[in-house]
Image: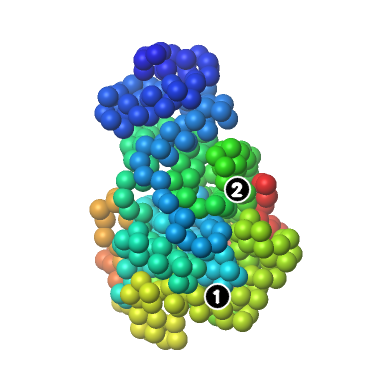
Amino acid sequence: MNMYDIISKTKRGIELTAEEIKMMIDGYVKKQIPDYQLSAWLMAVCFNSLTEEETLALTLSMRDSGDVVDLTGISGVTVDKHSTGGVGDKTSLIIGPVVAACGVSVPKMSGKGLGHTGGTIDKLESIPGCQTQVSFEKFIEYINKTGFSIVSQSGNLVPADKLLYALRDVTATVDSIPLICSSIMSKKLAMGADCILLDVKMGSGAFMKNTDDACRLAELMVKVGKDAGKKCMAVVTDMDIPLGKAIGNTLEVIEATDILKGRDKGRLYELCMELSAYMLMLAGKGTKEQCLKLAQEAIDTGRALEVFERSVAQQGGDTSFINDYSLLDTATVRYDVCSVSEGYITKMDSEVIGKASLALGAGRVTKESSIDYTAGILLEKEYGEYVNKGEKLMTLITSTKCDIEDISQKLIDTIEISENKPQIRPVVLKTVE
């Protein structure tokens, strides 16, 4: 069997064997198969999809293309969480300490943000002194000390995904559910955790724009995870509106810290409690109700905040900011965006807000772009709230040279205000077990 035959089979909807898929992935990583042939195969997948068996084989072949993390040095059960990305998504900074405070280890390797969706590593690196590039031995040591650590992805983890994603990105083959699934799950399986919770975002600020596609992706990822021998479940969550009131690295660290202090019990807190409860369930800590109570108690008693503080400190971060946010870098420019009418806010487009934050300097256009940790947006009013004409909707914050008036106008143009109060849908739309 050669690559020509593999392309032909997928083009005609004939199922590939696991051996054929492994041969293809191994050959591409070793540069024995040219880009033009793999591009042809990727396009055939976009038109004809893959079976569940093919998707599993593709995922495992990608996982095995590089190193697989060995977490046996961590005592007890390990649980990882993956989000498909969104605007204002700082949940990892909250649920990691919460779950660790309940006695379950949360080892997490994350990446930096690209485009309008932020990266957890960028948020951590906005804390003075905090190091995310650490040795694997140190990573295991940190987990055993505090139960929680987030570090940068390192080593030769899933090189096949890096190569395939770069090719998909330039050949318009990103939006295939089996390819998305294999990309995400190959990395999660390579991370080595015993249990995996998948947070599949759905809405304007997410990659999956509708509920049906988000549910299909969630179901496929859970199936692949279980077939690969992991305890796995997924939740489909709302990303039509941003998560919380802060978008931008330093701003999101402050908001996450406020939630760990128990000061904020809004929609972001609600989601974090749900995600924490599911992670604890996967680890065998009890029923959903019991685990939800454990998560809430971790916040209320201050144990989660203590884990967060110790985790930041062991990675070199200056934790004095926890009691004095002014010790974090502050922006040079603050610009108020005010409402041009009165009524209830019926639309706040997450993608537009995310792109506005990017334009302010809070994100990267390319992997090589520099980032302004101070930049971002504070939502003074949220979806469903009443606003008066001239009242402040949001504050734009930056230390980067940009056309802030143009950014403001684009935001005003996309915010919809009505005399009728909109229905607020739940933050968790579906659970896939």
Instruction: Judge by depth and name the residue closer to the eye, 264 or 135.
Output: 135
Is residue 168 in sight in this rendering?
yes
- Answer few, some or many: residues within 10 Å of disc 2's Cα (few below 14, many 20 plus, some between 14 and 19): many
Residue under the image location 39 percent in, 81 percent down? 319
Q: Position of residue 2 (x, y in %)?
A: 36, 15
Could you tell me the amino acid type at mark 1? Ala
* Dot 2 or dot 1, earlier in sequence: 2
**Residue 235 to residue 32: above or below:** below
- Find residue 296 and report its image quarter: bottom right
Residue under the image location 53 percent in, 19 percent down? 15
Instruction: Judge by depth and name the residue closer to the eye, 142 or 249.
Output: 142
Q: Which residue is mark 1?
A: 304
Q: Is residue 333 left or right of residue 269?
A: left
Cα separation, mark 2 vs mark 1, equals: 24 Å
Q: Which residue is mark 2?
A: 232
**Residue 366 to residue 41: above or below:** below
Residue under the image location 73 percent in, 60 percent down? 287
Quarter holding the N terminus is top left
- Find residue 168 and report its image quarter: top left
Q: Position of residue 417 (x, y in %)?
A: 60, 62
Could you tell me the amino acid type at mark 2? Cys
Tag 2, which secondary structure? strand
Residue under the image location 46 percent in, 31 percent down? 58
